[in-house]
Image (spheres, rainbow, N blue to C red):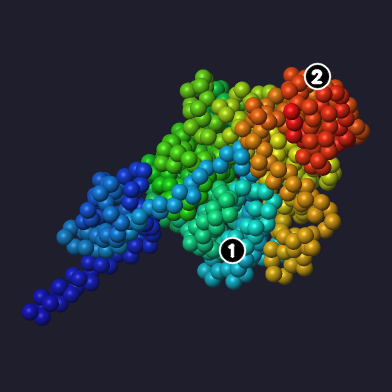
Amino acid sequence: MKVISSLLLFLSLNAISQDVQHIDPPFWWTQMPSQELQIMLYGSDLGGLTPEIDYQGVSIESVEKLPNQNYLVFNLSVSEQAKSGTFEIRLKDGRYTKAKIDYQLKDRTSDTNRNQGFDASDVIYLLMPDRFANGNPENDSVEGMLEAADRSNPNARHGGDIKGVSDHLDYIKDLGMTAVWLTPTFENDQTPEYGAYHGYAATDLYKIDRRFGTNEEFKALVEKCHSMDMKVIMDMIHNHVGDQHWWLKDLPSDDWFHDIEKYGTTNFRGEVQSDPYASQYDLDKLQKGWFVPELADLNQKNPVLAKYLIQNSIWWIEYSGVDGIRMDTYVYPYKDYLADWVEEVMTSYPNFNIVGEAWVEKVGHEAYWQGDKEGEDDGYDSKLPSVTDFQIMFNLDQALTEDFGWKDGLSKLYYAISQDRLYADPMKNVVFIDNHDTERFFTKMGEDEDLFKMGYAYLMTIRGIPQVYYGIELMLANDPVNGDGRKRADMMGGWPEDKRSVFTAAGRTKKENEAYDFVKKLTNWRKDAKAIHEGKLTHFIPENNTYVFFRYTDDEAVMVIMNGNEKDVTMKRDRFAEILDDYQTGVNVLDGATINVQSDFQVGPKQTAIFELKR
């Protein structure tokens, strides 16, 4: 009997010996739009085990065999009959159970104030959590993580976090912003030599970086924004992960990543994807080359990986309630995969919105990536609702800094907008004048305050969904340092040791307050300007270094006049009679001055004048 008892004890201990280090996704929900659920388990020698589940409404449909035996991937069906609760996943080797895992199905929230999408009625405030505000100094450096905070280095981690953003939501809302876009908050446990404070080098796609906070804190931030009538846009990356991601330490399969030894780094030529004459060499270099050596390029043609990435997006949407996604490096991955990803996300969340970062050089290349455009020569439909309209930024930079001419200066804006027929819906484009990857707008304008105001007023009135970059309300300029840190300065007052705070009027300089008041007034005015949100656009060929366009609905109209001259200009009313005939006066939205639009009128120098037209 002792021999039998000892044998049973040995078998019992041996049965539950497997260590499961990763379970992705960590939990799921009932009544999801799709009944499919792929689970990835990682741990020593899991690949040869057989999963078993005994839970009503949940069944194992298939097991995916990966070459690396430390991975076990299987597909479940979670039917409509499945109830919330915890069930056991048993991993078996023959008749022996090697591991038991508790897996939870949760009830979906009934809250409807989530997953709302974003549109042209919004103004998006883009911020980098690491550089915005440090609400919790205790998480600046976390034991066991590779990079500690070093605020003395402009290109290192500075300690900003989710709590810092949450603490200053009133500031953002007061500016008139209706949506917040945070650069990625995923775990980026990269080496200090790389410096992954920006968030674009994920090392775990299911975890918020502990130096930013926790998953729960991120969710609470979204809920707080919603309670304040602001939306949240989450930044994601499906082109690459950081080279310290746990996958790189034990590859699931040889084709999980593209081979940097074979393809090197990318050519950064997103135009190749839409080029009908592109060579296979150039296409491979774009799609399979690594962005930089520290960012491992994902191969979305691997079906298990593709499903993992799509499901990860859906998990974050459902878990946090975010209203939109900005997908980084959109023109680099396989475009058929991207179309599948968009379709699955938008089918699951019809009110949602996605904007893809399409950093390309011409309108035609940009428009290629927006979906639902009939007549594409190659038959590709990206299904993508929105693109980042780099063409607006490129042309505005030149419009305000070049001498006026047939093709130059303000004429550049006319030529860019006149190609809007190429877009499926240009009103869905996200328009901007700078962001975290570009020089700051005030710097590009030579720190000319008039040009700065002209550009911001244009951004608030042109078609599309405007995005502004944190600090623009202060006319923040580039720091005089090398590296990307020069355009990503800290918001003074966001750190306990700061000597002043730009989050308060008393802490801002006179010029900062002037800029703040200007941005606040225009942005808040835009919130109620339906002609800007919904209106048509009619513009007139630039003449005499002026450019005029109208935004209008059946009920209201706005006249925008960009005067690039150093002196007043007289606007000939008859030239604009097709619209002005219906109106008597125009009220300047900035100073309240009234003009008579039934006769010629003057506009002051170096400004973008905005007039609400009155009948």
Q: Position of residue 219 (x, y in %)?
A: 50, 58
Tell me if I can see residue 199 in this picture. Answer: no
Q: Residue furthest right?
A: 567
Image height of 470 relative to 423, above or below = below
Q: Is residue 590 left or right of residue 30?
A: right
Q: Is residue 252 left or right of residue 538?
A: left
Give the residue displayed 60% in from the left and 60% down from the top.
166
Kind of residue sitting beneath label 1: Lys
Residue marked by disc 1? 163
Image height of 120 relative to 320, above or below = above
Q: Position of residue 150 (x, y in %)?
A: 67, 65
Residue marked by disc 2? 575
Which SS class for mark 1? helix
Q: Residue furthest left?
A: 1
Between residue 370 and residue 261, name the one nearer to us.
370
Tell me if I can see residue 426 in this picture. Answer: yes
Image height of 144 relative to 519, above or below = below
Give the residue displayed 61% in from the left and 30% down from the top.
426
Q: Are marks 1 and 2 in contact (CB under 8 Å)?
A: no
For the N terminus, which image quadrant?
bottom left
For the C terminus, which image quadrant?
top right
Sequence-wise first label, 1 or 2? 1
Label 2 crowd bin: few (<14), some (14–19), many (20+), radius 10 Å:
few
Give the residue displayed 20% in from the left and 71% down from the top.
12
Between residue 592 and residue 58, name the one nearer to us.
592
Image height of 236 relative to 91, above or below = above
